[in-house]
Image (spheres, rainbow, N blue to C red):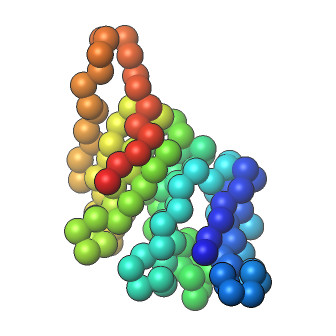
Amino acid sequence: ICSGDQKGCIKVWRYRSGKCIREYPNAHENGVTTLRFSRDGGQILSGSFDGMVRCHGLKSGRVLKEFRGHTSYVNCAVWMASERLVLSGGSDGTVRLWDARSASLVRTVRPPQRHAADEAAILGIS
């Protein structure tokens, strides 16, 4: 189990004992909004109010990759395509597709809005 708080700290817990086994005290500059373990459980993908998506190594305790490009809060982030890609959605109204290895932006999608002046936040993706 992992949890993120309003200060940008991420903690990993053993679910049976409730013991914290890893802490990332400065994972983000602001509150953590989304967390996902990799399939093998060795990495954590996180998003934050600081506009960043990050990949953290569970063994190393370090940030492995930073995905920069959202201009507002990141509300959701998921691994895609056997973890070769990362998909993120933000309050800037964009869905962004990233190369997970290089952390480079592959594509930005701005879903159509009801009104031209709208900028609807992306709150969930799959």
Query: Is residue 126 visible in this depiction of the protein?
Result: yes
Q: Give above or below for 9 relative to 95.
A: below
Q: Where is residue 122 in the image (x, y as percent from the top left)?
A: 41, 37
Q: Total marks drawn?
A: 0
**Rendered location of residue 37, percent (x, y):** 48, 73
Q: In which quarter of the image is the N terminus?
A: bottom right
Q: In this view, does 19 lie above or below 25?
A: below
In the rendered image, residue 3, in percent from the top left (x then y), is placed at 65, 65
At x 58% / y 88%, what residue is drawn?
Answer: 59
Residue at 42% x, 76% y is: 38
| Residue at point 57%, 82% (across, down) | 58
Q: Is residue 105 something that shows in the picture?
A: no
Q: Which residue lies furthest to the front in this view?
A: 16
- Give the camera-side residue of 76 and 52: 76
Measured as percent of width and height from the top left, residue 100 is found at 33, 67
**59 lies left or right of 25:** left
User: In this orientation, which residue lies closer to the viewer: 49 or 29?
Assistant: 49
Residue drawn at x 72%, y 75% as measured from the top left: 23
Which quadrant, please, contains the C terminus?
bottom left
